Amino acid sequence: MKNKKPFLVASLVVVGIILLVGGFLCGVLLEKKRTAGDAAKIANLQKIEKIIDSKVVTAIVARGKVSKISGRTITVSSNSESLKVFVKENATFLAYAGLVTGGQVPKATSPAKPAGFSDIRVGTQLSTTIIISPAGQAEAVSVAIYPPGS
C-alpha cells in the first residue's frame, strides 16, 4: 500500500498539470478567435474615423425622431439607435409643411418656413446637419423640421 501512494500522488499531479495546460491552451485559442473579430471591427472604425476627420467631410446629417430634449441637447432616434446632439445657439432652423418621401431624401412640396428651437418637441421628425466638436460632441448647425408622418 505504501508503494502505491507516491505513484497515485504523482499521477494526480500529472493529470492536474495536463488539465491546467489544456485549459490554458483552450483559453488562448478562444481569446485569439474572439479578438480576430474585434480586430476587423477596430479596423473598420478606424476607416470611418479617418473619413470623418477628413477636411473634405465638413458635416454629417442625422435624421430621425426626437425622443428626448434636455436643455439644448436633443436625442434623435431612428429604429433602435439614437444620437445625442447639442443644438448650437446660432443653428439655422427651417420647417417644411409638406413632404413627399419615397427615397432617402425627402422632397418638399412647399417652401420651407423659418423656425426655431422652440418648434422642436418630443416626437418631431427632423434632420440635422451636425459637426463634431473638438471635444467629440455632435453639434447641430442646422435643423430641418418635417411634418408628422414624414
Image (tube, helix red, strand yellow):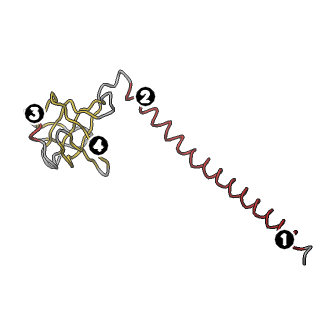
State the residue in front, 52 or 8: 8
**Residue 23 appears in which quarter of the rendering?**
bottom right
Mark 4 burial class by Cα count in 10 Å: few <14, some 14-19, many 20+ = some
Residue shown at the point (68%, 54%) measured from the top left: 24
What amino acid does circle 3 point to? Answer: Ala
- Residue 16 picture location, percent across and down: 75, 63
Mark 2 to mark 1: distance in Å? 62 Å
Q: Quadrant of residue 53?
A: top left
Q: Is residue 98 left or right of residue 137?
A: left
Q: Nearer the viewer, residue 25 or 128?
A: 25
Left or right: where 130 falls relative to 44: left
Secondary structure of the residue carrying numbered label 2 = helix
Q: Secondary structure at mark 3?
A: loop
Q: Who comes first in sequence, dot 3 or dot 4?
A: 4
Q: In this rendering, which labeled residue sits more in front, label 1 or label 4?
A: 1
Q: Which residue is mark 3?
A: 112
Residue under numbered circle 4: 83
Q: Amino acid at mark 2?
A: Lys
Q: How far apart are the two marked residues, 3 and 4, measured between alpha carbons?
A: 25 Å
Q: Amino acid at mark 1?
A: Leu
Distance of label 1 from label 4 (alpha carbons): 63 Å
Mark closer to the chain start, 2 or 4: 2
Q: Is residue 11 above or below residue 87?
A: below
Q: Residues within 10 Å of mark 1 (few under 14, many from 20)?
A: few
In this rendering, the label closer to the viewer, 3 or 4 = 4
Q: Secondary structure at mark 4?
A: strand
Residue at image point 21% right, 46% down: 65
Residue receiving disc 1: 8
The residue under label 2 is 50
**Residue sitting at x 14%, y 36%:** 108
